[in-house]
Amino acid sequence: MKTYFPLVAATGILAAAAAQAENWDMPVAYPSDNYHTENAVQFAEEVKSCSGDALEITIHPSGSLFKGDEIKRAVQTGDAQIGERLLSAHANEDALFGYDSVPFLASSFEASEKLRAAAEPVLGELLASQGLTLLYSVPWPAQGMYFNQEVNSVADMAGIKFRAYNSSTARVAELAGMVPTQVEAAELKQALATGVVAAMISSGSTGVDEKAWEDMSNFYDVKAWLPRNTVFANTAALEALPAEVQDCVRTAAEAAQSRGADTAAELSGGFLDTLAENGMSVAEPGEQLAADLAGIGEQMTNEWLESTGEQGKAIIDAYRAE
């Protein structure tokens, strides 16, 4: 049962709230040493401090409380009060969730931030209709392609078992003649080790997390897109908090969004260095491969706009506006 506090002076509210502190669970899909998870831990610490201990958020990494594909639903139903999820993994539910995974639309951190701002009104409204409140999102480094062989064109990819984590990655695989298999982050290492998948598109961060050099030999820095992990709260749980505590959550979320983006940019080059230091070939795509992938990107952009209608067009128009 939620506790409601009388409208008194701010210090009195926080003192009363601290006496009957609220505890929230925050499931995340990534390991504790991943920068997204570390950022979430700092977010939780700032909420606790700002609220005078009135709200304590416990981070559950590596899908330990709910697996990645269960997190959004768990927050919607109130089984968790807050969570972090790669929303593009839910593009089959609503194509708008895939705004950040349209190939070659936004291929830099600056472009990713501009696209996030353009999509925020539409995305916030969509989440609100599902009982969720958008708090913040943080980009991954630009996505590259991992293989266990040299790849010079899309033709070289035919028949390869490819790890998909959302509808965009599955569609890339299909258009390239590969075989997509949905694999969540927590199961990725095992899937690579056992041959369930033999290639993937992901960031250098994921490659380092999973020690990709143990299972694959080549990384192509195609800069396909910068997917974003999004943190959202159960709206009813958030609105049951005193107004001052809600403000603390939103203030900490704003700081987490900025801090996370800065961290991603700072770490990006180092991830690729680590891949190379461990024996992977790290290279830009060749001319033919780049041209083949650009064609796939153009087709997928058109498909996304067709599936999202006026809302998708509004996002793209806002993103491309001067």
Image (spheres, grey):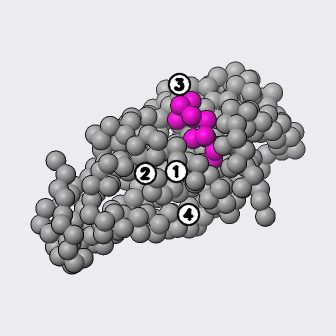
Q: Which residues are magenta?
A: 90-103
Residue at x 19% of width, y 58% of height: 4
Q: Is residue 14 above or below residue 145?
A: below
Do the residues bearing badges 1 and 2 touch, measured as CB atoms within 8 Å?
yes
Q: Amino acid at mark 3?
A: Val
Reading the image, the residue beneath label 2 is: 133
Cα separation, mark 1 vs mark 2, equals 7 Å
Q: Which mark is on residue 124?
A: 1
Q: Amino acid at mark 4?
A: Ala
Q: Quadrant of residue 311?
A: top right
Reading the image, the residue beneath label 4 is: 261
Left or right: 15 in relation to 270: left
In the rendered image, residue 25 lying in the magenta stretch gets the answer no
Cα separation, mark 4 vs mark 3, equals 32 Å
Reading the image, the residue beneath label 3 is: 196
x and y, in percent, of residue 266 in the image: 58, 67
Please state which of residues 73 and 59 is positioned toward the viewer in this rendering.
Answer: 73
**Do we see residue 116 in this rendering?**
yes
